[in-house]
Image (cartoon, rainbow, N blue to C red):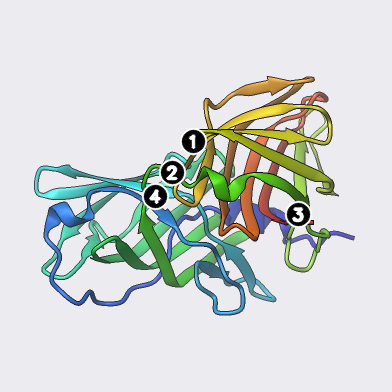
Amino acid sequence: MISSFAPLALALTSLLTAGTTAPATVARPHDYLGTWNYDQPDRATMRNVAVVGATPPIHVPQIGDIVFTRTGDRVTGRTDQGCTWTFAVRPASLELDPPSQNCFNRVIGSAYTITRWSVTVSGDRERETIEAVSHQPTGDYSFRLDDGRRTRARAGGAARFTGSWRYDPADPATRVNVVTTRYTAPDRVVQSPRQGNVTFTRRHDVLTARTGDGCAWRLTARGNTAKLDPAGQTCSGTTLSFWTVATDGRRQASVQAGTGPDGGAFLLSVGALTRP
């Protein structure tokens, strides 16, 4: 049986971010600006893997991008899941300011408050640490990302996605490849494993992902991360509202959300695939 904490893991999947180390040189404000992708999560080293304070603790891989822009004397960061955060520019880092900011994440259907977020850069590498609280019907849960790492997003990178990929076996203990689907009238939640293959082909930076149900989905790759483009694609009664994939060429980590033909709203928060 799937653990009752699975919805919590889903709701936390994209609390977004990662760990902090001082850069070799003091960064100027414009050094932070632009788009940054999370590097591939690694459970062995805990790089880009957040720890959620449930019992037992939940480990949630972090993927996706953030876009930093200048707003007066501040820097604004907007994540690929639609949350916006404001940072003060310090001599050696960006610091979340004010220190407690809230966002309701529509992809994961949950609110959370980030209490501390520190960002440093050195060239095309960025590191972050984050502390947050996830607000759930069952209570508030702590969230920590101690070793967050990103790389500045560049054009290209689609080649590493191409080929056939297979979903790893679903694991209720780690929430890997477990889909949560929510229905209304009557209100119920169903959890099921995600299985099968996905084949990616490309034309320049545009990817076509073909799934086992015969559907083809369009994504755009930039660096190690590909995102559904445009959002709101429909095939055979299924609508995808969100799909972000990160890969190092050997493994994939993904987050996917949408609505199925039966009207249920589904979320795959910890997708994991490898090459067959």
Total count of labels: 4
- Label 3 to label 2, Cα distance in Å? 28 Å
Residue 102, label in figure: 4
Q: Is residue 173 left or right of residue 111?
A: right
Query: Pointers 2 and 4 in contact (CB under 8 A)?
Result: no
Q: Nearer the viewer, mark 3 or mark 2?
A: 2
Q: Residues within 10 Å of mark 4 (few under 14, many from 20)?
A: some
- Residue 207 position in % (x across, y down): 58, 34
Residue 156, label in figure: 2
- Helix, strand or loop at label 1? It is loop
Query: Pointers 1 and 2 in contact (CB under 8 A)?
Result: yes
**Mark 3 or 4, nearer chain start:** 4
- Residue 20 position in % (x across, y down): 33, 73
- Label 3 to label 4, Cα distance in Å? 28 Å
- Residue 50 position in % (x across, y down): 53, 68
- Helix, strand or loop at label 3? It is loop
Is residue 125 visible in the rendered image? The answer is: yes
Q: Residue at x 53, y 43 (%)?
A: 158
Query: Pointers 3 and 4 in contact (CB under 8 A)?
Result: no
- Residue 61 position in % (x across, y down): 58, 62
The residue beneath circle 3 is 177
Comparing 22 with 89, the one in front is 22
Identity, as a three-letter code, of the amino acid under mark 4? Asn
Q: Is residue 91 left or right of residue 180?
A: left
- Label 3 to label 1, Cα distance in Å? 26 Å
Q: Residue at x 62, y 50 (%)?
A: 254
Query: Pointers 4 and 1 in contact (CB under 8 A)?
Result: no
- Label 2 to label 4, Cα distance in Å? 34 Å
Identity, as a three-letter code, of the amino acid under mark 3? Asn
- Helix, strand or loop at label 4? It is strand
